[in-house]
Amino acid sequence: MGFNFSVAVWVGYIALFGIAVETGVVMVVYLQEALDRRREAGPLSHQDIETAAIEGAVQRLRPKLMTVAVVMLSLAPILWESRIGSDVMKPIAAPIVGGMLTSTIHVLILVPVFFAILNERTREHV
């Protein structure tokens, strides 16, 4: 968007990383809870791990999308503003708005996939 890397941009990145890490940790908690429910029934199979990953990810779909929607809708007006103070706020808002899109893909798709892969590997070694 043409912004120089300034302190304001770094503040935006730090805020984005905080939101992304928080939602990622909550996703892992839900995935682990779903896996623990499957583990109570007996030894885990590949299908159990896959089903638990899908179940945990589906439980977090709506809250993650709501978080992204609220952040995007609250910061979008800042990006369109051109009056006093916008020169300070735009560099903060731009990385957050852009990063929320990639954070959504990461948390909803990649975290469950990596969770399933890691649990499959530990199941094979036990």
Image (cartoon, rainbow, N blue to C red):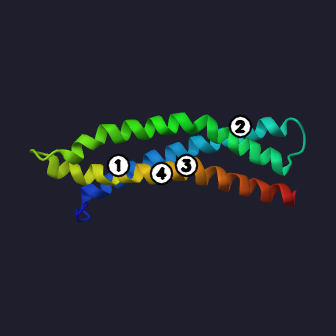
Q: Residue at x 43, y 41 (%)?
A: 68
According to the picture, the residue beneath numbered tag 4 turns out to be 103
Mark closest to the chain's N terminus, 1 or 3: 1
Instruction: Tell whether label 3 touches label 4 (CB within 8 Å).
Output: yes
Q: Nearer the viewer, mark 3 or mark 2?
A: 3
According to the picture, the residue beneath numbered tag 3 turns out to be 107
Badge 3 crowding class, 10 Å Cα cut-off, few under 14, some 14 to 19, many 20 or more, is many
* Residue 68 to residue 112: above or below: above
Instruction: Tell whether label 2 touches label 3 (CB within 8 Å).
Output: no
Q: What kind of element bears circle 4?
A: helix
Instruction: Tell whether label 2 touches label 1 (CB within 8 Å).
Output: no
Q: Is residue 33 left or right of residue 61?
A: right
Instruction: Tell whether label 4 touches label 2 (CB within 8 Å).
Output: no
Numbered circle sitting on residue 97: 1
Calculate the distance from the C-alpha at mark 2 to the C-alpha at mark 4.
22 Å
Numbered circle sitting on residue 33: 2
* Residue 122 to residue 89: above or below: below
Badge 4 crowding class, 10 Å Cα cut-off, few under 14, some 14 to 19, many 20 or more, is many
